Image (cartoon, rainbow, N blue to C red):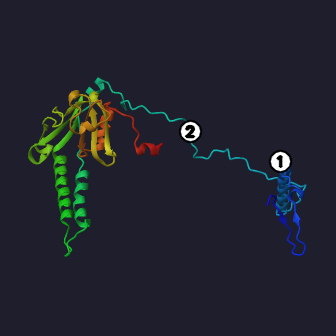
Amino acid sequence: NKHNWILRNDKKHPQRLNPKSLPLAIPPTLQERKMKLSLLLLSMASLARGFAPAPTKISSLTTTTHLKAAFTGKPENDWSDKPPHKRESTTPVPVKKVNWMERQMMEDVMIDPNFFLAFGVAVLCPLIIWYHPSYDPNGGPSIIGVSGGIFHLLFAALLWVQTLRVRCVFEKDAFEFYNIKGPKLDLENGAYLEKKPDNYVAGTRNRWTYDSITNYGFFPSEEFPVICYFKETETPEWKWNRYFAAFDSYGGGQPHFFPGICNAKQFKAQMEARGVKRKPIKSLKDIKEE
């Protein structure tokens, strides 16, 4: 067959058709494709519009919401109106300025002993033994509790002896620690004051002039002085970093610590009366009084 023949699907009247006599299918142009695409998009948009909610009628009357202005008042505890913090000076100053002549006219004063610290440590002995938990199945006292109680009892005995025999004396130009020697350690019945051996830390005499002292205090407080403290510059500077003095971050002198075996209020009163310098650091009691 030289030509492609198309056979009509008619069994009664079969007829051969010439393909050249059929109209040719013209492919759509680019413009027609764009139009079809546009119509498709429009139809999809119209369908989507049917699912949109109906618009509501907006009332012509508008409601106004009154917003409260931000609170600009300052509460009583507001710190914004407080003056900026001013760092207070810690330069040692005397509570009372006293010249050399006034000191020479003052009488020597011996500070009274204070047994409160020794008594307080002794009371801890039975408390530790009684309240320390025991692991004995028979209910006996704890070995650790008994050991701790005995230690505090021995320490209290040492404090008691030191309180009996050590005295702090304020003299004309300096104060010094003495030991009481003699029968029954009674100054009224033949006992006398003897100079203590040299200080075991600094290796100097236990006597310090008032002008060399730069600070003093009591820990934890003046009412309950477990430890008394003062700092002086009379000790040679190359000895300032020995033992406990190595923990002093301020420097500028040799610190000394001793247990509160003397009357702290009398000690402070004599320091102030003789013009001894002290750093003006406020205590909790001073802050409350303000």
Q: CA distance from mark 1 to mark 2?
A: 81 Å
At x 18%, y 56%, the residue is: 151
Q: Is residue 93 left or right of residue 45?
A: left
| Residue that numbered label 1 is attached to | 30
Q: Is residue 146 left or right of residue 71?
A: left
Amino acid type, callout 2? Lys
In the displayed structure, 125 sits above or below 184; it is below
Write down the quadrant of residue 9 in the picture.
bottom right
Q: Is residue 282 left or right of residue 194?
A: right
Return the x and y of residue 106 as percentages of the image width and height: 27, 30
Pick the quarter of the image with the N terminus. Answer: bottom right
Return the x and y of residue 218 as percentages of the image width and height: 31, 43
Of 52 and 231, which appears nearest the observer?
A: 52
In the displayed structure, 164 sits above or below 55; it is above
Amino acid type, callout 1? Leu
Return the x and y of residue 238 as percentages of the image width and height: 21, 28
Write down the quadrant of residue 128 in the picture.
bottom left
Is residue 111 in view?
Answer: no
Of 167 and 101, which appears nearest the observer?
A: 167
| Residue that numbered label 2 is attached to | 82
At x 36%, y 27%, the residue is: 97
